[in-house]
Image: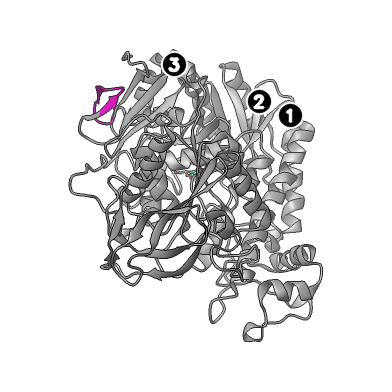
Amino acid sequence: MNFGVCYYPEHWPEKRWESDALMMVEAGIEIVRIAEFAWAQIEPEAGRYQWSWLDRAINLLGKAGLRVMLGTPTAAPPIWLTRNHPDILRIDAGGQRRDHGTRRHYCPNSSTYHRHSQEIVSAMAQRYGTHPFVFGWQIDNEWGGGHTARCYCYNCVTAFQAWLKDRYGDIANLNDAWGTLFWSQSYMDWSQIHLPDQSIDKPNPSHILDFYRFSSDSYVAYQRLQIDLVRQYAPEHVVTTNFMGLYRDLDQFALATDLDFVTWDSYPTGNLDRWQKHLYLKQDELDASEHQFAYDVGDPYITGMAHALTYGLKGRPFWVMEQQAGAINWGSVNPGIRPGTTRLWTWHALAEGADTTVYFRWRSTLFAQEQYHSGLLQHDGSAGFGLADLALLRGEQQQLADIARQPNEADVALIFDFEDLWALEIQPHRSDYSYLKHLFVYYRACQRLGIQVDIIPKSGELNKYSLVLAPTLHIADEELAHTLKQYVIDGGHLLLGVRSGFKTANNLVTDQPFPGLLRLLIGATVRSWQSLPEQFGWDLSTNIAGLNGPATYWLEVLKPDSASVRALASYSSGPYSGQAALIENSLNNGKIYYHGWYPTDPQARAVIGHLVDKLGFSRIGDLPRGLIARKRGDAIILLNFTDVIQTANITGLPIKVPPRDVTVVNSLVSES
Ligand code: GAL
C-alpha cells in the first residue's frame, strides 16, 4: 500500500513548504497530489502563465523524496474566463445560470471552455510532461460533483440535437423510439428538440434517458479531450481521475475506459449522511438484536460497496484519491474521529482492492469554504489523529504490501448498470423505489454471509463467476439475453430479480410478456406485480432454511411455462396465494433463478445462502452486522465497525475483533 496526501502549496506561505515536505516524508508519504484547483494561480490572466511558484513547489516536494501527481485545474475556471466568456457557465434545470465563486460551474459542451481547457492542459503537460518529479495526472476533479452532471444551457441544446441525430439518423426514428405520438409530442426537425428540464408535467421518459446518456457521453468526451493532450506531452505518465463512489449521474464504467486506473474519494462519515436515504428502505431498519455501527466510522456496507464498484470499473486495483482523515465539513453532524479510525478506513480500502491511499488533506485550511474540514495536520500545524494513524500504518507497511499483492478474487458477481439505474430513477413507479437500494440489499447479504463479491458491468466477463446476481436487468436487448443464456448453458448460475427485462433500450415497455426477452431464459412469465403499502405483506411457503415471509414492498407473480421450472417459494396469502414467488430453471449445466419479490435483508441472505451452499463454494461464514471480512490470498482481513467486540468464526475458531479495529488471520488460522 502506497500512501499519499492532497496538498495545496498555494494555500500556505512558501517558507512553510519545506517543513511540510519533510514531515510528509517522515510520515511515510510518497505521493503528493497538487494543483487541481490552481488555475487562477497558474494563469491569472488569459495567456499569462505564472509557473515559477509551481516549479518551486514541485522541485521542493520532489527533492524531499515525494512523487507528484498533478491535477488539471479545469474544475475551477478563473474569473477572467467566466467574465470574458459567460457562455462557459452552466445553466441548471430551473434555467438559472451558475456564477463564479465555487467550482464546477462550467458547461462540459462549451466550445469556448474546450478551447481554454485545451490551452491550460497543453501548457501544463508541455511544462511538466517529462519533469523528473511528476509521474501522473488527475484529470479535473470529481466529474459531476455538486449536482453538475447535467447542464441545460444553449450549448447543450445544440450538442444534444447533434447527439440525437447521430443516434437516430432520421427524425422519424426518434419519434418512434420516444413514442412521441403520446400527447402530441412529435418532432418534425432536430432543431425543435429541447432539453427535458422543468416542464409542466414529467417529460417523456425516453427523452430523459437519452438526455442522461448524452450528458454522460459529454463528460466522457471532455475527459478524453484532456487525456489525449496529457498523453501527447506526458507519454510516460499515468492518467486517472477521482470518482465519487456510488455517484449515480454519470456512467462511471464509460468514464473509466480511457483512464489507466481509477480512484475515488472516500468520506465514510459523510457518505453515510449522503447515501443512507438512497440505500436503505424503511423495512431495512435494524432488528433490535443487531448492533449499530459506531457513530464515527460510517456505514461499512456503503463504503464497501463504493470500494467494490470502483474496483469493478476496471476489475483492477484502484486508489483512494481522497481518504477522510478527520472530521469533514459537509455532513449534517460531522463527527470527529478517534485514534485508529483512519487506520481502520485504510485497511478497509486495502481489503477491497486499493493499492494506494491518498489522504485529504495535509493541513486544515484557515480560509474559505472548507475551514471546518480536517486534514492530517490541524489548523495550527500540529498532528491530528490521522497523522498518528499513519505512523501505525507505516509500522504495518510490510504486511500491507504483502496483502496488496494477493489476488482479490470473488466467486460471485453483482451486475451494476447505470442505464438501468437511470431508467428506474426516471420511472420508479413508487416514490421510494430505487435501483441502488435493490442492489444494496443483495450486496449486504453477500457481506453478511462472508461471500466475496465483485461488481461488474453488464458487459463483464460472466464466466469467471460461479454465481451472477443481477437483481434488476431492467433494460434488456437480444445481445444481453444471448450472453446470459450462454453463461448458463456453460454451467453458470444466474439470479434475476424484480423488474428485470421490462424495458427496451429506448426506455419503452417490452411488447412481450414479462420479463420480455429474458422470459425464455427463466422459463416463466411474470403475470403481474403489486407495489404494496408499507404495512402489508404476504406469507411465503418454502423449504429454504431461514426464508420466512412476509414478502413486502414489491411483488411479482410467476407462472412457469416449462417443465424444467421448479418453484422454490410460493405466496401463501394475498391475491397470488398458491402461485410461484421464486423459481429455478435448469438449462444444460446451469441454473437460472428469478426472485419475484424485493427481499428484506434476512430474506436476501436466506436465498443467496441457499444458492451458495448448493453450489458448494467456500464462504468465510456468517458475520454479525458491522463486522466485515475480506479474503485476499490466504489472508482474511476482519474489520469491526461497531463499538463492541465482535466475533467471527473462521474455520470453526472464534476470532475476536476489538471495536473499530482490524485483525488479520491466515485462512488456515494462525492469527497475526
Ligand atoms: C471532495 C473534493 C475536495 C474537497 C473534499 C472535502 O469531494 O474533491 O476538493 O472539497 O471533498 O471533503
Where does the image place residue 337, in percent across and percent down from the top left? Answer: 30, 36
How far separated are the C-alphas under marks 1 and 3?
A: 30 Å
Give the overall secondary structure of the magenta segment.
Answer: strand
Q: Residue at x 25, y 68 (%)?
A: 535
Local SS, label 3? helix
Asked if residue 267 can be seen in this view, the reply is: no
How far separated are the C-alphas under marks 3 and 2?
A: 24 Å
Q: Earlier in the sequence, mark 3 or mark 2?
A: 2
Name the residue type under label 3.
Answer: Gln
Quickly name the residue at label 3.
Answer: 397
Indicate the quadrant containing the C terminus: top left, top right, bottom left or bottom right: top left
73 in magenta: no
Q: Nearer the viewer, residue 186 or 410?
A: 410
658 in magenta: yes
Q: Is residue 60 above or below residue 429?
A: above
Where does the image place residue 134, in percent across and percent down from the top left? Answer: 66, 25
Where does the image place residue 72, in percent across and percent down from the top left? Answer: 65, 40
Residue range highlighted in magenta: 648-660
Does label 2 point to a residue whose CB lies under 8 Å from ligand 1?
no
Where does the image place residue 492, in percent across and percent down from the top left? Answer: 55, 40
Q: For residue 53, which quarter of the picture?
A: top right
Quickly name the residue at label 2.
Answer: 134
How did the renderer colour the structure? one colour
Local SS, label 2? strand
In the rendered structure, are the residues bearing label 1 and label 2 in contact, judged by CB atoms less than 8 Å apart? yes
Q: Is residue 257 above or below residue 160?
A: above
Dot 1 crowding, Cα within 10 Å, few <14, some 14–19, many 20+: many
Name the residue type under label 2.
Answer: Val
Q: Nearer the viewer, residue 484 or 267?
A: 484
Q: Is residue 595 above or below residue 35?
A: below
Quickly name the residue at label 1.
Answer: 129
Answer left or right for 215 relative to 665.
right
